[in-house]
């Protein structure tokens, strides 16, 4: 069962998401929050698998709430899925850097919402849609880049190759096919890379790959 916390300051929006999600046998809405501060508190209390987090909320916005949740070691298993609109896309890359596992446009179709929750709950990043890749690329290119992480030196040549493919949006199966590996081996490589680099999931691997210039935005067109 996937346990979901809904964080949005609009009651009707939360009700709509609840109605959609609770129609699925494998999803349970365990709680709601009307602002970012409440979202952080409720995440600590309920330990959901996924937090659906709106960006614009009173008291504490979704970006800072995401940062606090993802920085808390007690909430390491909690994944954050950002809800946004095209007029706030400047926040998307910041949210991924803060630890979010992906984002959805708020007027997404119900089937896409359900799919997104399942994808994030199993530890994958919501990076497959072309628009997502383009947005990440755009904001990665515009952001001030820190120096490449010294942790990259701990990766083998094969692991660096896998990291680049993850950043290009390839699934484990696609990576396995590209590198002529078994899917299990590809998954092991990805897990080992995340452990070595100290990141939560594939979304943070993408961010790190951009910031360390292992991949450039033009690769995702």
Image: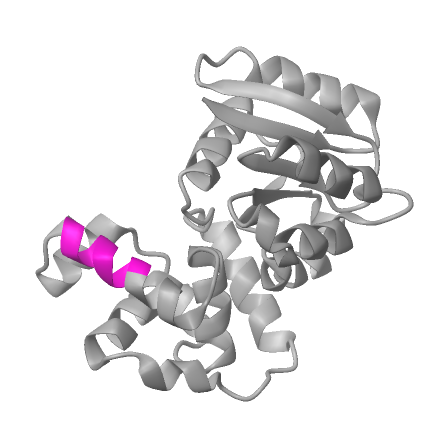
| Above or below, comparing residue 63 to residue 33 in the picture | below
Which range is magenta?
Answer: 184-191
Viewer-proximal residue among 182 and 1 = 1
Is residue 79 in view from this perspective? Answer: yes
The image quarter containing residue 28 is top right
Identity of the residue drawn at 43% across and 73% down? 209
Q: Horizontal and vertical percent for residue 154? A: 33, 82
Q: In which quarter of the image is the N terminus?
A: top left
In this picture, is 149 found above or below 128?
below
Q: Where does residue 155 sit, x and y in percent of width and height?
A: 30, 79
**Hey, which quadrant is residue 109 in on the image?**
top right
Please give the name of the residue rendered at 59% of the width and 32% of the height, measured from the top-left corner. 108
Q: Residue furthest right?
A: 59
* Residue drawn at 37 percent across, 57 percent down: 169
Q: In this view, does 88 lie to the left or right of 171?
A: right
Predominant SS along the magenta part: helix
Vertical comparison of 187 with 53: above or below: below
* Quadrant the C terminus occupies: bottom left
Where does residue 128 sit, x and y in percent of width and height? 41, 48
Residue 89 visible: no
Task: Tell me which corner region of the image, top left, top right, bottom left or bottom right, holds residue 156.
Answer: bottom left
Q: Where is residue 37 in the image (x, y as percent from the top left)?
A: 83, 43
Question: Of 50 and 24, which appears nearest the observer?
Answer: 50
| In the displayed structure image, the side of residue 97 where residue 156 appears, left or right | left
**Residue 186 sits inside the magenta stretch:** yes
Residue 104 lies left or right of residue 219; in this view the side is right
């Amino acid at each position: 069962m996937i346990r979901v916390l809904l964080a949005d300051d609009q009651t009707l929006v939360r009700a709509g998401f609840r109605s959609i999600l609770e129609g699925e046998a494998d999803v349970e809405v365990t709680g709601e929050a009307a602002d970012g501060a409440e979202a952080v508190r409720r995440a600590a209390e309920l330990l959901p698998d996924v937090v659906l987090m709106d960006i614009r909320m009173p008291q504490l916005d979704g970006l800072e709430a995401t940062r606090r949740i993802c920085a808390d070691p007690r909430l390491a298993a909690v994944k954050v899925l950002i809800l946004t609109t095209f007029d706030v896309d400047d926040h998307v890359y910041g949210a991924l850097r803060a630890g979010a596992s992906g984002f959805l446009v708020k007027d997404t179709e119900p089937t896409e919402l359900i799919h997104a929750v399942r994808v994030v709950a199993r530890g994958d990043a919501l990076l497959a849609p072309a628009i997502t890749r383009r947005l990440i690329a755009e904001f990665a290119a515009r952001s001030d880049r820190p120096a490449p992480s010294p942790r990259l030196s701990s990766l083998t040549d094969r692991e660096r190759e896998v990291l680049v493919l993850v950043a290009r949006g390839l699934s484990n199966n696609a990576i396995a096919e590209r590198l002529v590996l078994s899917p299990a081996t590809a998954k092991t490589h990805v897990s080992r890379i995340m452990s070595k680099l100290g990141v939560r999931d594939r979304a943070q691997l993408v961010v790190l790959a951009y910031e360390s210039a292992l991949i450039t935005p033009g690769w995702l067109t």
